[in-house]
Image: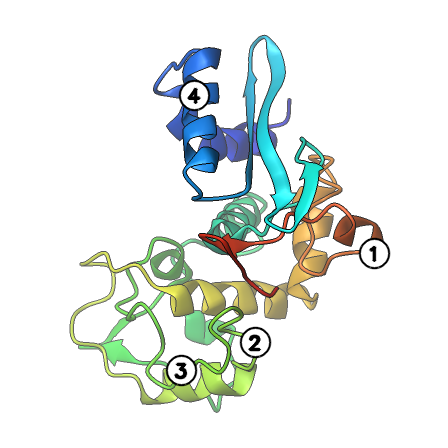
Amino acid sequence: MSFLKKIFLSCLLAPILSFAMTDTEIEDIMKKCVDEGHTPGMVIGIIDESGTKFFKYGQMAVDDPTPIDENAVFETGSISKIFTSLLFTQMVKNGDVKFDDPIDMYLPKEVSVPEYNGKKITLGHLATHRAGFDYMPENFIMSDIYNPFSEYSVEYVYDFLSNFKLTYEPGTKYRYSNVGVVILGHILSLITNQEFENLVSDRLLKSMEMDSTKVNLTDEMENRFATPHIRDKIVPH
């Protein structure tokens, strides 16, 4: 197994494996969650020294009784940040960038990146949520609650950076930030001159044979997409 694959699988599976739960305990939790109406279906995958094991329970959607299985495709949401951070880690390891590179090295000169008493924001600050940015950018307007960043363009990102005022020195405090990871992903795309989806696919997904992980679903993947829900309400995607 490759170095990158070991890191990636550890990030995903450590929370589950750390509990050393039995198969029956896992199945009971899934059954309770589905039967109480929290979700129409669940799939859990575990990889350890004995191989790969899948647990599944429920159906594909509230209006689709098709039994859910390990081939179902799920929307990852904020778990996508793992891909951005892992991609950054790989690029640091390969010498493409340095962890402490200031982000203004890679952004257009017309973008005014905030500093605090001369302390610059680095790529590492973005990756570790220590840049000093808020959870969401100040100029963010949610036009679609189910796809909040759909209209947040690069121009909005640059406007945010040029107008944001840091209230403390970057690197001194942890503050979870969606916009920080957005900026990191954008910069990695600029450095490699690749669209983010292609960059992740070429450098991460192909080597790990993750053929069912995409930014935009193929027609074939649409057919096995597990519809997102909030309780018993279908969420558009």
Quarter of the figure that contains the C terminus: bottom right
Report which residue position mark 1 lands on: 219
Left or right of residue 37: residue 120: left
Report which residue position mark 3 lands on: 140
Mark 1 or mark 3: name the one nearer the start of the chain.
3
- Type of amino acid at the residue the image marks with label 1: Asp
Give x and y (percent) for residue 20: 38, 14
Left or right of residue 66: residue 26: left
Which of the pair 69/100 is nearer the observer? 69
Q: Residues within 10 Å of mark 3 (few under 14, many from 20)?
A: some
Mark 4: secondary structure:
helix
Quarter of the figure that contains the N terminus: top right
Q: Residues within 10 Å of mark 4 (few under 14, many from 20)?
A: few
Mark 2: secondary structure:
loop
Q: Nearer the viewer, mark 1 or mark 2?
A: 1
Mark 1 or mark 2: name the one nearer the start of the chain.
2
Q: How is the image coloured?
A: rainbow
Give x and y (percent) for residue 148: 48, 73
Report which residue position mark 2 lands on: 150
Mark 4 or mark 1: name the one nearer the start of the chain.
4
Whether residue 112 is visible to the viewer of this picture, yes or no, is no
Report which residue position mark 4 lands on: 28
The correct choice, above or below, for 174 with respect to 3 in the image is below
Q: Nearer the viewer, mark 4 or mark 1?
A: 4
Disc 1/disc 2 C-alpha distance (Å)? 21 Å
